[in-house]
Amino acid sequence: MAKYLLKRSAQILVTLFVFLTLVFFIVNAQPGDVSNFYALNPDVPPETRERLQDLFGVNEPLWKQYLVHIRNTFTGNFGVSFSHYPRSVADVIMERLPRTVVLFMTATALSFYLGFALGKVLAWRRGGWFEYTSTVGGVTLYTVFTPWFGLMMIWLFAFKAGWLPIGKFLDPVLWREAPIDANTVFNQMILTAFVVSIVVFAVFVITGQRRMGNARITRIASIVLASLAVVGVWFSSGTAVYAWDIVRHMVLPVVTLTLISFAGTMLLTRNSMLETMREDFVMAARAKGLTERAVRDKHVARNALLPVVTSFIFSLAFAVDGGVITESIFSWPGMGQTLVSATLTEDLPLAVGAFVFVGIFVLVAHLVADILYAYLDPRIRY
Amino acid sequence: MTSDPVLVVEDLTMHYATRAGPVRAVDGVSFSVERGQSLGLVGESGCGKSSIAMTLLKLLPDNARLVSGSITLNGVDVVPLSENQMREHRWDRISMVFQAAMNSLDPVYRVGDQIIEALEAHSASAPRDAMERVRELFDLVSLDPSYIRRYPHEYSGGMRQRAIIAMALACEPDIIVADEPTTALDVIVQDHILREMQAIQRALNMSMIYISHDMAVIAEVCDVVGVMYAGKLVEFGPTAEVYARPIHPYTKALMSAFPSVRGEKHDLATLPGEPPDLLDPPSGCAFHPRCAYATDECRTSIPPTAKHGDQWATCWNPVADVDSE
């Protein structure tokens, strides 16, 4: 395993190098530089623009810029953002990345959970209205034009019903007087979610291993207690109202993203289940006198899980670039929007930096998928 | 011998509904198995052997219809039982050794855990007792206890078959149905496993049903044998007598198609033709198109089952001369 990890890490470094090279040259292939942005501004004379070009080093020969880019990336220095000057690229990305990751990971996780649960039932009870409605409904949502569907959701739930905010990350009016800034609150929220999921996961693992008869009760109790603890801590700190504001802003994009993507997982799970159901060990499990539910969940679904997990990991990886369209529709200030505005303003360091982060995330996700595979399927050993 | 039947099957008929009409996979089969007895079911591929096995556990695909008959397991007719009631009988009273031993173990769980799973489905025993039981079972089938915590892919073919047998024995069932238990194994391993199964069966006074197309395997391990053709039981009787003096022409054809090591040498006779299409079985006796002794009577009317000494056969023109009753 250690040897395999070492080998894979070396491969990842090579791939990353190729990726960095490609990204740099493709991004630099677009005409102009950051000074163009001021070309029509009478307050910025040509001399000033030239100084600007010298300052940002965009007049250097391309190969020199490339070497600097490679050196800087491997030393963790992504440079200064032209459009957010004088903030560093890393600083901008560190602000935007968590927003995108939280939004899209939540949506992806929900979509896979829903898709897997529905796919399981679909494979088990073929024929009938349930299969018909969920397949037709799911595929319709899956193939629908995303911007239109996003706008319809906003129109229905935010504009007509008024239940949810129309867009953006938070409500500026509420935050004007806030004693604490949004990033701090958001980071605390991430930390809370992380701690809670670790605790709940630990409870699930422990009850699973000890084969406790009342595992279900213990599990539900752990979830309820953890949720109560979270509510208690947030309310006592007095920042709950701000956290709630962010959560409310997340609901519409998460629901929209979940609805347009769950059908893929649902159909994948269904097909994977149908294939597994033909295996002899499924018949053997039935012959052992297990309940239909145990046969379905412990044997068929467990074996059908593998391709679904692969698909899940890759979806997570691509969630980082934040669906430019979705973020634009919901005015969500994440990586997608950052990427678009960086490209439009010729902010090459920020554009390259954003791409590099996405690339690293995808490569790491592949490695995680491989490791997870070995854990899920005992036949796979490296 | 006092009669203590563990399993009595009467007039069992099971059809598969297909678009082209019902396939008569099991057609009016009756037999019984005494406690401690082993019954062999032989026949060509597609004669309904495996369908009988699946019917006995009521593990039938959606398109299968149990048309008529009864399956009396330890005095209880399981045919009218609901799926939930049937589940309690499965493995606890009647268990199975599957045809494809290679694939009958779930690849993602340890073998020991899969046996414990069967134990837990039928009794609320403590995990430690269950583990103890698994150790006993591994010992019984001569598997190294260190393999309890291993995964199926780490087992060899013979070991997997032993694990499957251990699993079938887990709940001390009254009867085990072994569907081609050794077909996928090489001859040496096959022989070992058959002998061990026989020894265990005798030691525990269990009943067995062996299903095989291999007359030699049946001859080695079975007390009684049933010969199947086109979903029907055409001959039934003590193994020694059926083998020595087959009554049904089909049994005779099967006998002359497999070589005897000790007997005199003769060219092996092959049986011409194909097993009949169960969608549209021939009129009268289903065997008549391939039968050397067929008469007009065979072509038009279904022969009755008649007793010939200790044997029963369903034939108009028995090939052996045993006093009919």
Image (cartoon, helix red, strand yellow):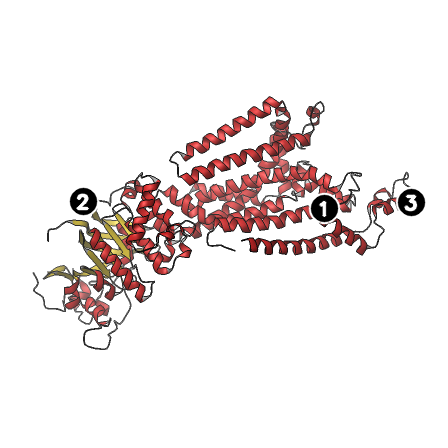
What residue sits 46% from the left and 30% below the top?
A221
Label 3 crowd bin: few (<14), some (14–19), many (20+), radius 10 Å: some
For mark 1, give the secondary structure.
loop
What residue sits 67% from the left and 31% below the top?
A184
**The disc labelled 2 sits on which kind of residue?**
Gly
Cα distance between the residues tagged 2 and 1: 78 Å
Residue A46 is tagged as 3
Q: Is B102 situated above or below A117? A: below
Q: Are marks 2 and 1 in contact (CB under 8 Å)?
A: no
Q: Are marks 3 and 2 in contact (CB under 8 Å)?
A: no
Q: Position of residue B138 (x, y in %)?
A: 32, 52
Label 2 crowd bin: few (<14), some (14–19), many (20+), radius 10 Å: few
- Of labels 3 and 1, earlier in sequence is 3
Q: Quadrant of residue B189?
A: bottom left
Q: Which residue is mark 1?
A: A76
Q: Chain of mark 2?
A: B
**The disc labelled 1 sits on which kind of residue?**
Gly
Answer yes or no: are tags 3 and 1 on the same subunit: yes
Cα distance between the residues tagged 3 and 2: 103 Å
Q: Which residue is mark 2?
A: B75
Q: Are marks 3 and 1 in contact (CB under 8 Å)?
A: no
Q: Position of residue A29 (x, y in %)?
A: 77, 53
Q: Position of residue A68 (x, y in %)?
A: 78, 51
Q: Is residue A228 left or right of residue A338?
A: left
- State which mark lies toward you, 2 or 1: 1
Cα distance between the residues tagged 3 and 1: 33 Å
Q: Chain of mark 1?
A: A
Q: Quadrant of residue A255?
A: top right
User: Does the rendering let one see residue A164?
Assistant: yes
Answer yes or no: are tags 3 and 2 on the same subunit: no
For mark 2, give the secondary structure.
loop
